[in-house]
Image (spheres, rainbow, N blue to C red):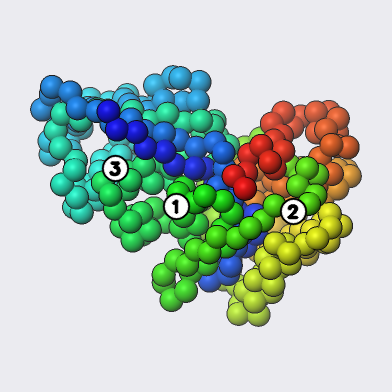
Amino acid sequence: MKEFYANGKLLLTGEYAITQGATGLAVPTTLGQKMNVQSFDSPNIHWQAYTVGGQCWLDVVLNSELEILKTNQRKEAQHLVKQLQIVAAHSDKLTSGLHFETHLEFDRSWGLGSSSTFTSLLAQFANLNVLDIFHEAHGGSGYDLACASAAGPILYHIEKGSAETTPVNWVPDFANDLAFVFSGKKQLTSESLALVEKQPFNPRQIQKINELTSAFVGALTLESIESVMHEHEQLIGGHLGLLPVSEHLFKGYNGAVKSLGGWGGDFVLVTRFSENQQWLKENGFEHALPLRTLALL
């Protein structure tokens, strides 16, 4: 049996604009997805995907031509076939008589990268460069694919159509004051991409976002990173016509709050976590994870 592993992801700065060349700070997460592959006596390919709770949410049997013979999720099975067709076009490792099992370490609704980790696992299995082969089909900037195999925080941007990833040492002295809080719903990447395509950022805004990313990474005090978070929220929200999360879901929170990735769902970054834990509980935010717990630093 062969085993593969991919990290989840969180984009701390540069959301939306990262698809248009802005530099973003991204962190792989300590929660990801693993895949086991083993041979069995069959002319078919069997794929089973399990939730963090151990339930098999996707069960697909394919023949050697990657035609669906049996499944419990037709739409998801069709997506699987499209990804496997990419593998088959670039590798000879996908053969009959293989049984695949994937196991998520986080809730699928959390937006930590159930899709990007899956894509990374396929690329690892086939020994393919995930950004070269899968980027176009996967969509988005590709930072999530880069996080899947990153050993720690990265600076990511697209230069003339090519992804550039730079490892960065980011472990602020005030790390214990930072945490990730699940907003309670999942944001669709497709909706975020559609929004920014309608309202692209101009070069001056891209440059400003790059400066904010640098300031975020280099912040030496909690107050300074809070200032960067606020300015970043105002820039993105003002341009796209979106309301910063601190002005609705987290109104009344005694600290800074910043949306991560597409606004309106998934996780947010908060400061002054310790002193606000009671507020979070009282306002229905059940899933709050300290930075050092969730981020692979």
Answer yes or no: do the residues labelled 2 and 1 have beta carbons within 8 Å?
no
Closer to us: mark 1 or mark 3? 3
Residue type of the residue flagged with mark 2: Pro
In the picture provided, is 61 more to the left or to the right than 227? left
Residue, disc 1 = 145
From the viewer's side, name the closer residue of 229 and 190: 229
Residue 42 vertical placement versus 203 (above, below): above
Residue sitting at 84 percent across and 44 percent down? 272
Mark nearer the viewer, 2 or 1: 2
Please name which of the two marks, 2 or 3, marks the residue nearer to the observer: 2
Q: CA distance from mark 1 to mark 3?
A: 15 Å
Q: Can residue 125 be seen in the rendering of this structure?
A: yes
Q: Amino acid at mark 1?
A: Leu
SS type, badge 2: loop
Look at the picture and state if 181 lies above or below 263.
above
Across and down, in percent, residue 120 comes to 38, 46
Residue lying at 41% horizontally and 25% vertically, measured from the top left: 50
Tell me the quadrant of the picture where the N terminus can be found.
top left
Between the residue at mark 2 and the residue at mark 3, the CA separation in whole angstroms equals 35 Å
Residue nearest the viewer, comparing 72 with 296: 296
Mark 1 vs mark 3: which is more N-terminal? Answer: 3
* Marks 2,3: beta carbons within 8 A: no
Which type of secondary structure does the marked residue at label 3 adopt? helix
Task: Classify residue 223 as left or right of residue 25.
Answer: right
- Secondary structure of the residue carrying tag 1 is helix
Q: Position of residue 211 (x, y in %)?
A: 69, 72
Residue 43: numbered disc: none
From the image, tell me which residue sits under label 3.
125
Relative to the observer, which residue lies in front, 159 or 172? Answer: 172
> Badge 2 is on which residue?
172
User: Mark 2 or mark 1, which has the lower sequence index?
Assistant: 1
Q: Residues within 10 Å of mark 3 (few under 14, many from 20)?
A: many
